[in-house]
């Protein structure tokens, strides 16, 4: 399976300084955002809940607001473990050009530099993908409950499609433009979906899941460069994408 070879080449480059920097930046921004969210949520609870209650037969109670605020922290930390991977994916997508450039510099040095996405475009694409990923998995949760034996297949099929579509589209668009990337994605939809399913495997392991954005960008860079690209006359060719 060629997708395994693509992933293997990506894993072999995970020690690259660019890969480490992008991974550390994405995780750092994610932790900072989630910590800020928890702090703001606790502050809002403390602000909304009165400092003092007077209860019948008990009298004045002054500790309920603190109890509610601090008891919410473990729940928020639990929820954050599920949000960390998609949020990290959104932040890391801002720097996927760096990962792809590093892969191309090592494995495809004959290629000319590719145009980079603007910061605002990368931010918009990243958080649009975050929204789609969260909503799709919330919807899939109902299917998990109705069809428990099929839950693993639904999970990998859905996330394989979403990951493959997102990463391949972003990487191919650097060389072919978004219209060309969409045409190529449709032409090789099965290969891209299978590679996306492979990228979904680390998602079931919380810590490994944080590697998915960088690993996915590198893997789909290799996949893109080995696919024949059809020209307007229907002929296919390999090699550099100018």
Image (tube, grey):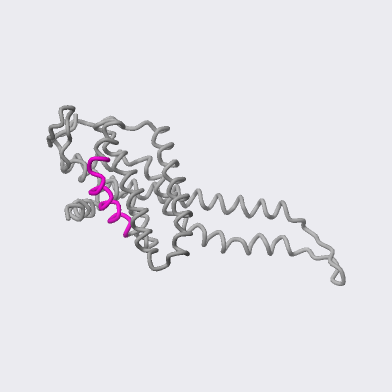
Residue reaching furthest to the bottom:
57
Q: Measuring from the top left, give residue 210's x and y in whole percent.
A: 37, 55
Answer whether residue 219 is visible to the viewer in this image: no
Residue reaching furthest to the front:
146
- Image: 170 above or below 214: above
153 lies left or right of 11: right
Quadrant housing residue 54 = bottom right
- Please tell me which residue lies in front, 167 or 18: 167
88 lies left or right of 71: left
- Please tell me which residue lies in front, 156 or 80: 156
Q: Residue sitting at 63 percent across and 64 percent down?
A: 71
Quadrant housing residue 169 = top left
User: Where's the N terminus, which quadrant?
Assistant: bottom left
Magenta span: 186-201
95 lies left or right of 42: left
| Residue 190 painted magenta | yes
Q: Residue sitting at 36 percent across and 63 percent down?
A: 152
User: Where's the C terminus, which quadrant?
Assistant: top left
Q: Measuring from the top left, give residue 28's x and y in whole percent.
A: 43, 50
Q: Measuring from the top left, give residue 199's x and y in whole percent.
A: 30, 54
Q: Residue sitting at 48 percent across and 54 percent down?
A: 138
Q: Measuring from the top left, give residue 92's x and y in whole percent.
A: 38, 45
């Amino acid at each position: 399976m060629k997708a395994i070879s693509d992933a293997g080449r990506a894993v072999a480059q995970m020690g690259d300084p660019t890969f480490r920097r992008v991974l550390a930046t994405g995780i750092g921004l994610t932790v900072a955002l989630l910590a800020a969210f928890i702090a703001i949520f606790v502050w809002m609870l403390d602000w909304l809940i009165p400092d003092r209650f007077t209860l019948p037969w008990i009298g004045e109670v002054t500790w309920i607001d603190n109890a509610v605020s601090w008891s919410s922290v473990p729940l928020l930390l639990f929820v954050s473990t599920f949000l960390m991977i998609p949020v990290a994916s959104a932040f890391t997508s801002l720097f996927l050009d760096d990962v792809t450039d590093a892969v191309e510099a090592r494995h495809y040095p004959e290629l000319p530099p590719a145009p980079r996405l603007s910061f605002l475009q990368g931010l918009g694409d990243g958080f649009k993908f975050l929204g789609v990923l969260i909503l799709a998995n919330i919807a899939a949760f109902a299917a998990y409950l109705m069809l428990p034996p099929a839950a693993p297949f639904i999970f990998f099929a859905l996330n394989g499609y979403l990951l493959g579509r997102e990463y391949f589209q972003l990487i191919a668009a650097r060389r072919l433009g978004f219209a060309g990337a969409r045409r190529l994605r449709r032409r090789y939809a099965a290969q891209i979906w299978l590679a996306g399913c492979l990228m979904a495997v680390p998602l079931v392991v919380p810590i490994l899941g944080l590697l998915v954005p960088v690993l996915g960008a590198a893997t789909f860079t290799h996949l893109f460069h080995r696919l024949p690209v059809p020209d307007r006359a229907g002929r296919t060719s390999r090699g550099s994408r100018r």
